[in-house]
Amino acid sequence: MPLGISIRTIGIMKFYKYVGAETAKIIIQNSTLKFTSPVNFNDPFDYFPAVQEEGLRKFTRRINDEIGGGVKRYKTNHRETSKHLQSLRSGAFRDLYTRNMSISCFSKSPFILPMWAHYADNHEGCVIEFEFKTDSPLVVEYFSLGINQLSQILIPFDVNYSEDRPPLFDENGRTDGPNTGFQACLTKAKEWEYEQEMRVVTKQPEGIYSFERSQMTGLYFGMKIDKKDKTDLSRIIDGSNNYTGTKIRKHDVVMAYDKFELSKIQFRL
């Protein structure tokens, strides 16, 4: 597997997308998802790793060796090192190294109260359930393609929550360590921990991309969803299940009687 990436569990992994009703209709009908550049996320720290002096000279020498073919395009004296630090810490550099990557965000649970409020139109929307089978032969295909090529398989990675910003490179100037490089886009501040986020990352510019339709396995209708939206979504799901081979199950969401919790019940129109 590339970049030291590992799959969290073996077997079936469920992950969930909080969306408005109209967005849900598009996703289910077209089997497409929007992937967004980290630069356009609501968190200004997103994929904006820390650049520290420790390891900078080794990082610069490695860039000279691997990109410059041994030619010292970037000097490592004190004055130039200060310039490098300033450049690498800039928003312009962040824009540069994220321009050919984009992310679609999910959660580990369909019952997160703030997520319903923030991303599912205050319970007027819904949550789409996705499934990823880690033992599927498609996984082998995905990793044989590599992270730099487009795959229609949605493979979610856990987001890590930390007090510290992830580093761009480690003390040895490497960007392929456990917290650097690609892994930096999977690290967020602990204040976001309630989202229980998972991410699907593609090395493609921001845009709309197709995914494997069979990965959709459920829809949770918000408690305040409009009756027409519920009817339309139910019809779209039935059409998908009947004609495209999906097995999307429909669920209603209700409040627990004695706790600040949500649960699912049998779907009804």
Image (cartoon, rainbow, N blue to C red):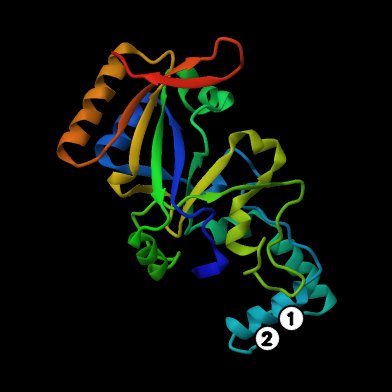
Measuring from the top left, give residue 2's x and y in whole percent.
Answer: 50, 69
Residue 65: image location, x then y, percent = 63, 85
Q: Which element type, helix, strand or loop, lies under badge 2?
A: loop
Name the kind of residue labelled 2 in the image: Lys
Query: How far apart are labels 1 and 2 at the CA level?
Result: 6 Å
Which element is circle 1 on? loop
Task: Kindly identify the residue that appears in the image at 70 percent across and 67 percent down.
Answer: 169
Task: Estimate how packed mark 1 is, as few (under 14), some (14 to 19) or many (20 or more) residues with alpha carbons within 10 Å.
Answer: some
Q: Which mark is residue 145?
A: none
Type of amino acid under label 1: Lys
In the rendered view, tell whether residue 124 sits above or below residue 72.
Answer: above
* Mark 2, residue position: 72
- Residue furthest right in the image: 78
The answer to whether marks 1 and 2 mark residues whose Cβ atoms lie closer than 8 Å is yes
Q: In this view, does 256 lie to the left or right of 241?
A: right
Res 213 quadrant in image: top left
> Residue under circle 1?
75
Quarter containing the C terminus: top left
The x and y percentages for residue 221 are 39, 22
